[in-house]
Amino acid sequence: SVPIDTLLRLLYLKHRYGLGYEMLCREVSDSISWRRFCRIPLDRPVPHPTTLVKLVRRAGPETIAQLNTALLEKLAGGKLLRARKLRVDTTVVEADIDYPTDADLLEHAVRKLGGLVRRIKGRGAASRTRFRDRGRAVGRRMKQLARTLRRRTGVAMGEVDRLTGEVAGIARQSLGQVQVVAHNARRALGRRPGDGRLGRLVGELEETIAATERLLAQTDQRLAGDRVIADRLVSLSDPDARPIRKGKPGRPTEFGYTLLLAEEEHGFIADHQVEQGHPADAPQLVPAVRRVIAVTGRAPGTVVGDRGFGTAANDQAVEALGVRRIGLQRNGTPGKARQALERTRAFRRLRNWRVGIEARISHLKRAFGLRRTRLRRLGGARTWVGLGIFAYNLQRMTVVAAR
């Protein structure tokens, strides 16, 4: 319903200026220059915001990745993207969620389960199955919890654990009844196989039941004294988000996805990759360099990265790809030969050039929406980041071409 060139130009404006879909459509509708840029005649209406949302979701991360690859190949063909030098770093793209606590997550689970059961009963399924919505009971405990946290004393923390345990008990009671509702609703769906709406509700209910069981296990583990929980679930609305610790003093823990960026000497983002959780930096370096080689057709002359990428295996693998100058600092205390190498003027120049990618990351987060993804799950995060990188490389192309 919307020409692809018009859609891409609209999405460029959205990510270039940080606009929401409704604001984007209003601005384009009121501006003659933006209408001309998007190729929308004055006598034609601007696409509705919900239409743009559906088209972006339908495209998915695979299509956006193909768009980025096509743009990079065009830049390489026009000799704007050289990639003679490459600097690599990782950062966090935050998920669109509040700061998670066990009690908050369980309250959200209880209220969501209650809402799904009401909607299923409204469709005429499991209508005679007994169910009590305990959302108000959970809400009272959450108010007590908020009052307790204001005291900020050692006694208050014990009270917090007690109230969290009560919230977990209420969630466990609700879960037992909801499982019966889900079983009976699945039987009703077997008699009505053509009811797609009921099928989606039952599927969402079963998914929420599994997530609630996982939250209860996490809460029991934390109340037992174990504060380190591997692969922790931090959101029901975005279950793919994970806690990521980068060691920042102001924000020791962030919640979202890990983004790998590879920037070349002209400022283009030659490669990016969004991953779930916090994978190690070192194994991601060589695949990133290989993807850049696949686009440009030749190996970069220089590759630099921080200490997370600095291993002897990476030095050997990158050198085998044809890279001549490697500026990967090592973790720990290096040997005498390595210290001598890192103190040379050439290595120090590579290290100083690497720091510039921190400014590029800040620019992408401030101006192109990469601070926080507004689309949920891993596929949504990859779509959001891909569109932001696409808009940035287009804008950068105008700067480099004008030189």
Image (spheres, grey):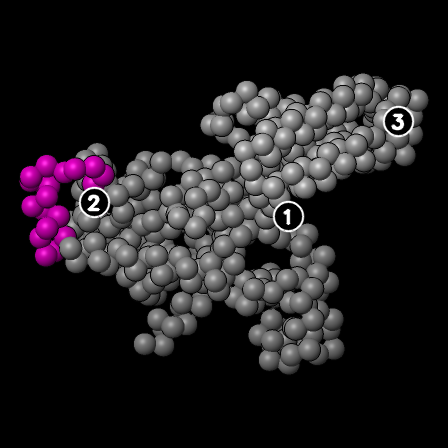
Is residue 111 in view? no
Q: Nearer the viewer, residue 4 or 345?
A: 345
Quadrant location of the N terminus?
A: bottom right
Residue identifier under label 3 = 125
Residue identifier under label 2 = 329
Q: Looking at numbered disc 1 in the image, what kind of residue is underneath it? A: Arg
Q: Nearer the viewer, residue 231 or 271?
A: 231
Vertical position of residue 48 compared to residue 278: above or below:
below
What whole-number distance in Å separates the C-alpha atoms at marks 2 and 1?
42 Å
Residue that appears at 67% across and 54% down: 53
* Marks 2 and 1 in Cβ contact (< 8 Å): no
Query: Which numbered disc, 3 or 2, marks the residue closer to the eye?
Result: 2
Give the mark nearest the N terminus, 1 or 3: 1
> Which residues fall within the magenta stretch?
328-347
Q: Give the quadrant of residue 153.
A: top right
Vertical position of residue 325 compared to residue 207: above or below:
below
Residue 58 got which mark?
Answer: 1
What whole-number distance in Å separates the C-alpha atoms at marks 3 and 2?
62 Å
As helix, strand or loop, the secondary structure at mark 1 comes to: helix
As helix, strand or loop, the secondary structure at mark 3 comes to: loop
As helix, strand or loop, the secondary structure at mark 2 comes to: loop
Residue that appears at 59% across and 48% down: 96
Query: Which numbered disc, 1 or 3, marks the residue closer to the eye?
Result: 3
Give x and y (percent) for residue 248: 39, 47
Q: Left or right: where does residue 80 sit relative to residue 180?
A: left
Query: Which numbered disc, 2 or 1, marks the residue closer to the eye?
Result: 2
Residue 144 belongs to the span the image colors magenta? no
Give x and y (percent) for residue 377: 58, 41
